Image: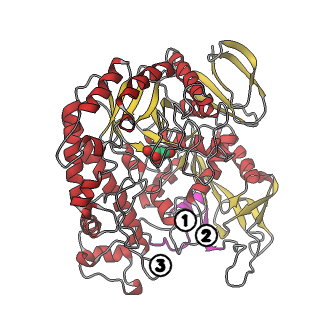
Amino acid sequence: MSVFWYGGDYNPEQWPAEVWRDDVRLMNRAGVNLASVGIFSWARIEPREGEFDFAWLDEVLDLLHAGGVRVDLATATASPPPWLAIAHPEILPVTENGVTLSSGSRQAYCPSSPVYRRYAARLVEAIVERYADHPALELWHVNNEYGCHVSHCYCDTSAAAFRDWLESKYGTIESLNDAWGTAFWSQHYAAFDEILPPRAAPTFKNPTQVLDFDRFSSDELLECYRAEAAIIRRASSVPITTNFMGFFKHADYWKWAQEVDIVSDDSYPDPADPQSPVYGAMQRDLMRSLGGGKPWLLMEQSPGAVNWRERNAAKLPGQMRAWSYQCIGRGADGILFFQWRQAVAGAEKFHAGMVPHGGTDTRVFREVEQLGAELRALSEIDDLLGTTVDASVAIVFDWDSWRAVEQQASPTAVSYIAGVFSWYRALASAGAMVDFVQPSDDLTARRVVVVPSLFVADDEQLVALDAYAAGGGTLVIGYLTAIVDPDLHVRTGGYLGALRETLGVWIEEFAPPASPDLAATGGGTPRALAVRGDLIGGLGAASLWGEYVRVDAASVDAVFEGGALHGQPAVTHHDRGAGTAWYVATQLDDAPLGALVDTILAAAGVDLLPKVTGVEFMRRGNHLLAINHSAGAVVLDVFGTDILTGVRASGLTLAPQGVAVVSAG
Ligand code: GAL
């Protein structure tokens, strides 16, 4: 990319042709240089089976091209037209409860349906044939947010595809029976034909069946993507993407990211949630990490309020710009929106647009123009666009563990993301830049690797984590790690499996605190736990999880205080080879976790960013970016030139939502 991309979803089919010229004029005014076109245009491109109408799209692409706006062209397969479902009702998705979902909304297709795939392929072939050589084409946008509404389909077609997937995974029915533990509750299968998707059932379903169905469902969606991408690649060398959705449980993006030429993301943090800036930062860091550190693209964000929350908070003045810079600081090379012109009809007419219902004399449009102008200017600055971000701290993120630890009938009800987020928040507020990794990645350059919860772990992963610590790394393991293998069979002999050697501890028994809302009796003990240790700042609070940790060789840094766990280890560390391995046996509150993280980062010699309350710092290329997320002005004690204002200063004042991009020179 030679400029920062700037633009958004453009849906000209929702407007009369007269508006299109005005759109291009306004796009130029706003500095828009990339428009995502055709995402929901199937019914307009193919209004009747096999009858293609490209005249309107020709005109749109030519207009954009004449106006200097590049095109991210969609394959239009995200929302099949009504005629297709009428001719082939078997493409409609079916829920776990057996309800068939109808047309009239979007994404009403079963990902495994060969009929859907055939029609989608024909559409993609027609689009590619027509536009592969169009001079405006910059990027291919395959489908849209795969799995957003229909991540799992339970119809008979899906059932058959699931059986094929299982057969190629397991080879024989007996190896499936072993993996699924079907000796339990009389679930033994005599043949693959007997297997169904995990449809609604009287009580707990087979956990491995459920996890396999999750894996299968992600793979089926990925197959849809692959099939479209293959058609494109035969005729075009233009890069291909499909838009991810941040921390989306139903698609294993480690796998998906291997298949896209550029990672792109849709991101809608709630402006009303005070945690959103940090959660947003975590999402950006995941996107950068999925692409192995390469620049990524913010494909969608809202210029203002969305329309799908119970309360749709408007963005504060400057907040859209501030959050956009968060993406830039964390490795994005483009900022796009949903959508260009705010709709007047349909289910998203109250969702903000870059050109709002109120027109151009509005705060939103002025902010859109301002950011467009700034990004154009920033494209000229050396050492920002296209550069990478260095992070010496990494968090292990694992989709199987996420899915499995949140299944029913687990040791306790937990939110995997909340656990990851608590570590991320502690590391980010200590001033660390963080990447996300898999245990199989090369970890040697990381000073600290945090594993919030690798609930599902295979032997190689545990060996890799051990090798990292033994090789001189600082490994931090959180509770509910290495409890089961990839078939969800428990690792017996004291939980933690091979990490027992690494950590110098093992777990004898789980003892999560009771929930305050014990349904049967209305009783229960408070959820809070207390922990004590100098290293965590004395007496601290914890919640959610406790356990009986047995020490083989580790040093105990904090213990549970009070209750049945009184005096039991809560935080330990162990010298492992040339490195150190920490274990944390509970969900520490922010204060003790922050104290622990400060100690760990200092001992590991991690380079930290400046720390100012309410201010987010990021380093990208040769630049330090600062965003004031707080409600009051702050003065920053940083040196250099703010390239947004040209001010060379030590002591920059940032208003609320203010941004500085400070070059070291
Ligand atoms: C996304 C989707 C867009 C639009 C947007 C509204 O999930 O890709 O088409 O619906 O949400 O926030």
Spot occupied by residue 321 in the image (x, y as percentages of width and height): 60, 30
The answer to which image quadrant residue 419 occupies is bottom right
Which of these two is toward me, 551 or 240? 240
**Left or right of 180 on screen, residue 569:** right
**Left or right of 231 on screen, residue 267:** right
Q: Is 40 drawn above or below residue 147 in the view shown?
A: above
Mark 3 or 2, nearer chain start:
3
Spot occupied by residue 167 in the image (x, y as percentages of width and height): 24, 68
Residue drawn 72% across and 45% down?
599
Q: Which residue is mark 1?
A: 496
* The magenta segment: 489-511
Q: Measure the alpha-carbon separation of dots 3 and 2.
A: 26 Å
Residue drawn 73% across and 34% down?
611
Mark 2 or 1, nearer chain start:
1
The answer to which image quadrant residue 552 occupies is bottom right
Q: Measure the alpha-carbon separation of dots 2 and 1.
A: 7 Å
Q: Which residue is mark 3?
A: 204
Residue 630 seen in the figure = yes
Q: Is 563 drawn above or below residue 34 in the view shown?
A: below
Label 1 Cα neighbours within 10 Å, binned few <14 / some 14-19 / many ≥20: many
Residue 245 seen in the figure = no
Residue drawn 67% across and 46% down?
272
Residue 504 belongs to the span the image colors magenta: yes
What amino acid does circle 1 point to? Leu
Task: Specify the label residue 417 is tagged with.
Answer: none
| Beta carbon of the mark 1 residue lies under 8 A of ligand 1 | no
Residue 323 belongs to the span the image colors magenta: no
Residue drawn 69% across and 46% down?
274
Task: Specify the label residue 507 is tagged with.
Answer: 2
Disc 3 secondary structure class: loop
